[in-house]
Amino acid sequence: MKNLNGTVRVSPAPSLYAFLYSILGVILGRWTDRFGPRIILILGSAFLGVGIGLISHVNAPWQLYVVYGLLASWGMSATYITANPIIVKWFIAQRGLALGVAQSGLGMRGQSSSTAHSEEIYEAIYQEVNWSAAEAIHTKSFWILTALFFCTWLFVFLLLVHLVIFAMDMGLSRESALIALSILGGSSTLGRLIMGTISDRIGRKKALTVTLCLQVLSWFWIMGTTTSWMLLIFSALFGFSYGGVSAVFPAIIGDYFGRLKAASVIGAIFTLAGSAAAIGPLVAGSIHDLTRSYQLAFLLGALTNLLALALLFISKPPRRTEVRGELKVEGNMVS
């Protein structure tokens, strides 16, 4: 596919990356729960390192599809699906903070060993209800969360792929666009740390509400962006909210469905919802080719996040009771 200037468009490569990165989640999640995370994490790190390393040697689009769309996506999926459930299993009282720190690539000190803190952890473990992926998919909570994150991720890669083109369409320099991309990445790290920590204090739903509201605001902001400083503000807002969602997502799934089969449940939701990220760059590219503008794509980004807010409002943890030897899951009977 080519853009209006005749240069080759590479948005299918990030879309392939996002699709495979997500679709592998359900397989890798089950393998992680069954065989343990070590071997999958080692292989995933190797694939990711090789894929990213080979990008510097790419000189044709098909090579980018192979090293980024295939190798790197497999590696990233393996590392994400193994690392986050490990944090979900190991941390309870400060799960959001731990996920934020882990996703930021930083080290963190151990938990407090006070008696009161230990009693709090033991009480949380005692009260925790754990679901397998097979059980979780029979609940309304599973499908509401899946739809919620589908809406959130649908256009999330749009800016990572098209931000430079958008900036140059406005007459801004490539350097300004690259600075905006750097700010987006840095604020994403900040969002993971801050919103992960805040979610431990105010709750996951409130934290997600904050991040989704910022996401909606950022989409509307970029629709009116005409200058470099406005683009930089957008990058900071969007990056922060995107990072916050990334940190709180596995935490709320752990809260809803327990720790023991977290990799399988996270992998299942990630496969169903995360694959939506492959659509955004392609849709945005097509809209730009037809209208010579990204305005409609940005509006769709805002509307899908507003829908995500509505879904978050009605979401709640699933309930489980034993009835005559059978498992009753929110009105559905499963053996």
Image: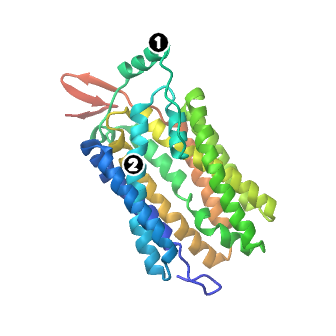
Residue beneath the point at 54% across and 51% down: 152
Q: Position of residue 97 (x, y in %)?
A: 55, 34
The residue at 51%/21% (across/down) is 112
Q: Identify the mark at residue 115; answer none if there is no mark.
A: 1
Q: Name the residue under label 2.
A: 81
Count of marks, rendered view: 2
Report how far apart the C-alphas of labels 2 and 1 lie in the structure.
33 Å
Three-letter amino acid code at disc 1? Answer: Thr
N-term mark: 2 or 1: 2
Looking at the image, residue 209 sits to the left or right of residue 231; the answer is left
Q: Residue 1, image x and y in percent?
A: 52, 82
Is residue 147 something that shows in the picture?
yes
Q: Position of residue 229 (x, y in %)?
A: 80, 59
Q: Between residues 146 and 114, which one lies in front from this camera angle?
A: 114
Asked whether residue 209 is in view, the answer is: no
The C terminus: image quadrant: top left
